[in-house]
């Protein structure tokens, strides 16, 4: 890199100089920046000024700082791809997609009329959708606080985190967890702090005095493990928030309408946000999430929303409300729930007990299977015609595993899937033992 610098001396000028080089791709991901002392000497300024400039670049996500490794240009992150091993010609069990036959068809909305067409003065959400959501909260015994409508779960999480955290803050997450969440935290310059999962759900933080600004919990059918919080563990979390009321509680109940498990009540009256995405049970193109939370949290989220998109399409909201009501009336959600549970049960019944012992309590479409070598199992399954997901994108500190999603599995393929999985696990483990 050219070391003939233009006349720059303040932290802002230094940050703008390197920012321009990075954004114009004159510096590439992985390129080193001069050390603080070296650049301070070259420019004839105080090292603290350079350190302040580098901190600005780090907080903007343009560089990483790593002690003796120095400062380097950060990798560019443009998608939420979790690195699935899906290959053309393979039966895809890696993406976590739902069975399209179990998603209510939009054809059920024949004769649908949007009742809320207005102008740019819209300042309320669809009464139809809010009423439907209120019935859901009542049915689940979830206290109704302040309600909002946003464009999917990640949109709601991002706005809540922006409202209650600052760059550099720490956020507790389940380990393993949903990879787009880790991408989001990285984008917001928040540090993900892992909490392990056990048979009762997400474990509580160690009592070491290091409190995070927020925690994100999945109450039912956690992705990727399928584990649901037990009432006892939920009660422990409620007790935790009595001692840490400033910690934002985000509850991601993405699977709620597709399970017969009761909702485990967790409460932080001062700062909590319940999120229900409609994607899993009404289809991923219905980019809507209903939030129910502390008034200060939701109000700040809505202020952010007004600056950007301002509102979620009322046509989309009314269509979602109508489809949701039809799905309930026609028992379509119950049918989907039973079908996914049956697939899971049939596969587990076809697997040996040493594989299924940690999976029996799970729910939803995901199976999280511990392995010695993720790559070996994925490759063996691919040779059998199945695309499954390596566990590494989901993990922080948790052991190696693979994720298999059953949304696309049909009853007549389950026995073959079980047979191929058993063989792949045995073959890969034997190979690992020979190597070790």
Image (cartoon, grey):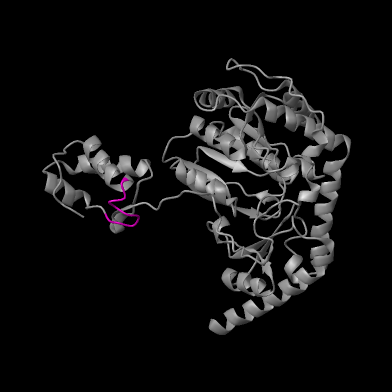
Magenta stretch contains residue 401: no
Look at the picture and state if 118 lies above or below 163. above
Residue reaching furthest to the left: 44
Magenta stretch contains residue 31: yes
Q: Residue at x 22, y 40 (%)?
A: 14
Q: Position of residue 294 (x, y in %)?
A: 61, 26
Look at the picture and state if 277 lies above or below 198. above
Q: Nearer the viewer, residue 179 or 325?
A: 325
Q: Position of residue 217 (x, y in %)?
A: 63, 43
Residue reaching furthest to the right: 330
Q: Which region is colored magenta?
A: 24-32
- Does residue 332 appear anywhere in the picture? yes
Residue reaching furthest to the top: 121
Q: Picture quarter containing residue 237?
A: top right
Residue reaching furthest to the bottom: 434
Q: Position of residue 275 (x, y in %)?
A: 65, 35
Q: Residue at x 52, y 48 (%)?
A: 182
Q: Residue at x 74, y 58 (%)?
A: 406
Relative side of 63 to 407, left or right: left
Relative side of 70 to 274, left or right: left
- Does residue 268 appear anywhere in the picture? no
Q: Main secondary structure of the magenta part?
A: loop
Q: Nearer the viewer, residue 302 or 120?
A: 120
Q: How many marks?
A: 0
Give the quadrant of the N terminus: bottom left
Q: Picture quarter containing residue 312?
A: top right
């Amino acid at each position: 890199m050219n070391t003939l610098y233009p006349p720059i001396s303040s932290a802002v000028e230094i940050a703008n100089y390197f920012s321009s080089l990075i954004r114009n791709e004159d510096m590439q991901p992985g390129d080193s920046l001069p050390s603080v002392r070296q650049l301070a000497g070259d420019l004839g300024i105080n090292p603290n000024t350079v350190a302040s400039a580098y901190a600005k670049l780090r907080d903007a996500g343009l560089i990483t700082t790593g002690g003796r490794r120095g400062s380097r240009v950060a990798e560019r992150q443009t998608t939420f791809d979790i690195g699935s091993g899906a290959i053309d010609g393979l039966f895809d069990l890696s993406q976590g997609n739902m069975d399209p036959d179990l998603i209510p068809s939009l054809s059920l909305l024949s004769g649908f009329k949007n009742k809320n067409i207005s102008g740019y003065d819209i300042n309320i959400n669809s009464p139809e959708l809010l009423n439907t959501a209120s019935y859901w909260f009542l049915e689940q015994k979830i206290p109704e606080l302040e309600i909002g409508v946003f464009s999917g779960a990640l949109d709601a999480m991002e706005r809540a985190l922006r409202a209650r955290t600052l760059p550099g803050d720490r956020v507790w997450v389940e380990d393993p967890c949903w990879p787009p969440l880790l991408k989001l935290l990285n984008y917001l310059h928040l540090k993900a702090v892992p909490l392990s999962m056990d048979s009762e759900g997400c474990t509580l933080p160690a009592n070491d005095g290091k409190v995070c600004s927020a925690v994100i919990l999945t109450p039912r059918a956690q992705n990727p493990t399928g584990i649901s919080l037990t009432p006892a563990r939920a009660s422990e979390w409620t007790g935790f928030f009595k001692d840490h009321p400033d910690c934002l509680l985000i509850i991601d109940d993405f699977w709620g309408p597709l399970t017969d498990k009761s909702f485990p009540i967790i409460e932080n009256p001062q700062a909590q946000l319940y999120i229900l995405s409609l994607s899993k049970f009404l289809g991923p193109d219905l980019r809507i999430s209903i939030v129910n939370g502390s008034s200060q949290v939701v109000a700040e989220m809505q202020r952010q929303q007004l600056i950007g998109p301002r509102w979620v399409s009322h046509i989309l909201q009314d269509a979602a409300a109508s489809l949701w009501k039809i799905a309930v009336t026609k028992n379509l959600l119950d049918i989907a729930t039973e079908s996914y549970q049956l697939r899971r049960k049939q596969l587990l019944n076809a697997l040996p007990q040493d594989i299924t012992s940690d999976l029996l309590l799970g729910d939803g479409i995901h199976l999280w299977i511990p392995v010695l070598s993720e790559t070996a199992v994925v490759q063996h399954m691919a040779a059998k015609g199945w695309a499954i997901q390596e566990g590494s994108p989901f993990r922080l500190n948790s052991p190696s595993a693979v994720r298999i999603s059953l949304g696309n599995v049909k009853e007549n393929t389950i026995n073959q899937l079980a047979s191929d999985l058993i063989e792949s696990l045995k073959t890969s483990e034997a190979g690992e033992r020979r190597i070790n």
